[in-house]
Amino acid sequence: IDDSVKKKVPELRFKGFTDPWEERKLGDIFVYKQGQQVPVENQFTKRGKNRHRFIRIVDLTTKNEAPRYIEYSGDNIISSTDLFMIRYGQPGVIGYGYEGVIANNLFKLIPKIETYNLFFKYILDSMYPKIQSLSSSTTMPAISFKSLDVLAVKYPDKKEQEKIGSFFKQLDNTIALHQRKLDLLKEQKKGYLQKMFPKNGAKVPELRFAGFSDDWKQRKLQDVLTVNSGSDYKHLETGEIPVYGTGGYMLSVNDKLSESDSIGIGRKGTINKPQYLKAPFWTVDTLFFMTPFKNFDINFLFALSKKINWKKMDQSTGVPSLSKIVIEKTMEYFPLLEEQQSIGFLFEQLDKAITLHQRKLDLLKEQKKGFLQNMFV
């Protein structure tokens, strides 16, 4: 295939489609209609008779934003198959699948020709950097209809549009499903952290495994683990031993600081994100590593370290900091080893499931990115 034809077809295509894609300016495909201006005092937080969902920029850009409703009887209503776009603030973000009335900083794209809007949602998504570059570089970025009009868009016939649009919709549904599973697991873990450790001076937790009834004993962390300092690694050569900082893995070297699994906790900077450090490893000087004594389960201690409010122990006036003494003097409740192991195992399994779902989700997002690059011209 010569270069002139290559530019008119995508690298990846569904079987049975061979025709070159057509190129038109966006202004030949859509006409634009600005949304509705509605004062805040005329917006409601509850549904009601003759009320429509009022769709704002935050509904597209912010997670879990509480919906607003307005009383409206005009013709500026969108259905779930309509396309709309942000015009001011974050120009180029595409909306699809909503029903209601869009705000005046959004605009509807009304087809002039026969289109499958779901396809155009994804092709315009893939063109987001280009659309954003067309916006004016003022304090409030905005996009003009004139600049959108001349934006060149390549597209196939409607049957191929439907195939591609439906494919990406299915992919998005799978991504959303994995995201929900991941969020649910994280919520479960959060709930267990609250209920499986004693609170408000209690000597036993609210939720316990069967067979355990003894009171938990309060101890200082210095009676349970050793707080070790990290060290500079720059004199070392490249190797296979991971080096960790407060932000996680950094690089690998040829020497180790520890041969025992430990819990990393920030000395300076990020002090509230404990890390499980699998031995052998090296930590930089801004990351302590806490190694448990015999008869104390590391998975239990790791779960406990996630529950402790480390930020409350920050004694600095500038960069957040923790000291060895402050960590060692911290008082927490501990059960006997067998109960620690049961609790530790539960949280270990939860962490593994969360990591697995996160990997699947990241992989799906990468796959979508690849498809967006290869399935459009």
Image (tube, rainbow, N blue to C red):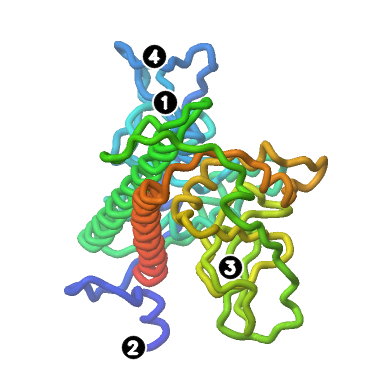
* Residue placed under numbered mark 1 in the picture: 67
For the residue labelled by badge 3, is the local secondary structure a helix, a strand or a loop? strand
- Residue type of the residue flagged with mark 3: Tyr
Report the Cα–Cα distance between label 1 and label 4: 14 Å
Which of these two is toward me, 188 or 297? 297
Residue at image position (41%, 51%) is 337
Label 4 vs label 2: CA separation?
A: 57 Å
| Any part of residue 220 in sight | yes
Q: Which residue is mark 3?
A: 249
Label 4 sits on what residue type?
Answer: Glu
* Cα distance in 3D space between marks 3 and 1: 40 Å
For numbered disc 2, what is the local secondary structure? loop
Q: Looking at this view, name the residue that lies furthest to the left.
A: 16
Q: Are marks 3 and 2 in contact (CB under 8 Å)?
A: no
- In this rendering, position of residue 341 left or right of residue 235: left
Of mark 4 and mark 2, the one earlier in the sequence is 2
Mark with earlier residue (2, 1): 2
Badge 4: residue crowd in 10 Å (few <14, some 14–19, many ≥20): some
Q: Amino acid at mark 2?
A: Ile
Residue 71, disc: 4
Which badge, 3 or 2, is on the more N-terminal residue?
Answer: 2
Mark sitting on residue 51 = none
Q: Nearer the viewer, residue 321 or 173?
A: 321
The residue indicated by pointer 2 is 1
Q: Quadrant of residue 110?
A: top left
Density class for disc 2 (Cα within 10 Å; few <14, some 14-19, many ≥20) is few
